[in-house]
Image (tube, helix red, strand yellow):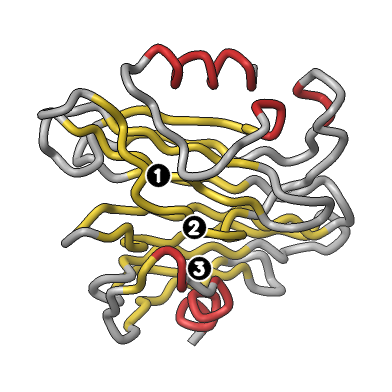
Amino acid sequence: MKSLLFGLALLLPGVALAEPIETRKIITALTGDFNGDGAPDLAMVVETGPTDPMDIHFFLGDKEHNYLKPVEIVREQIGGEWNGYDRAGYENSDAEPELTMLPNGSIKFHLPAPEIGSERTNQTLTVAYRNGAFIVAGFAYDSDDYLQENAASACDYNVLTGKGTSSKQQPDGSTKHKTVSAEGKTIAFRDWNSGDAFAACQE
């Protein structure tokens, strides 16, 4: 899978990398028009080291010169289970991130919970290109503990406006819903801190 994704990148004319990347460390990639100029762009999630968060390499298409220009490397912002990248096969990674292109040009990063322990928290980040930078536009999570009853919770909010909704299962099995009302912020993807987002959801 990884080699095929890298091959896709090579099919685009004039690909230039900001730094050498081992092809076997490319977890996943996505092409689309991130900045709305009609040229294909590219995002790649690249493994770093054991137990460390992963890097994201961003390229924007240059229509005039017909090549992909490296514009940013966001260091160690994507969680996942690094597990034997030197052995081919999807089964050797426990929790690979998933990238989806949204109709408005934003990128959805889905971060599935590692299959370790009873508590599982899946996260989703929506990243958008605005004013020359990649920023976090939205955050969501769903969580549950399979060894506890009525432990599910979830949240979905717009980071730019600070508005959203959250829910938490109660001891009696009912679900309490509330409105998230945090301070709206423009946060560069490279500066993102998921701890602040969980705090906003649980206020």
Point 16% across, 27% down: residue: 65
Residue hosting label 2: 74
For disc 3, the marked residue is 167
197, above or below 13, in the image: below
Using the rendered view, name the quadrant where residue 153 is placed. bottom right
Please report the residue visible at 49 percent of the width from the left and 30 percent of the height from the top.
29
**Where's residue 64, x and y in %?**
10, 29
Tag 3, which secondary structure? strand
Q: What's the residue type where badge 2 is placed?
A: Val
Q: Position of residue 86 (x, y in %)?
A: 84, 28
Q: What residue sits 31% from the left and 31% below the top?
A: 68
Say if 76 sits above or below 41 in the image.
below
How crowded pointer 3 is (Cα within 10 Å; few <14, some 14-19, many 20+) is rated as: some
User: Mark 3 or mark 2, which is nearer the start of the sequence?
Assistant: 2
Residue at the spot 72% in from the left edge and 41% down from the top edge = 95
SS for callout 2: strand
Kindly identify the amino acid type of the residue bearing the numbered disc 3: Ser
Pick the front one: 152 or 67: 67
Q: Would you identify the image quadrant in which residue 121 lies?
A: bottom right
What's the CA distance linking mark 2 and mark 3?
A: 31 Å
> Which badge, 1 or 2, comes first in the chain's sequence?
1
The amino acid beneath tag 1 is Phe
Tag shown at residue 58: 1
> Left or right: 31 with respect to 34?
right
Please report contact status of discs 1 and 2: CB closer than 8 Å, yes or no: yes
Task: Looking at the picture, tell me which residue is in the foreground, 174 or 72.
Answer: 72
26 or 108: nearer the eye? 26
- Can you give x and y, in whole percent of width and height, for residue 146 in the image? 82, 54
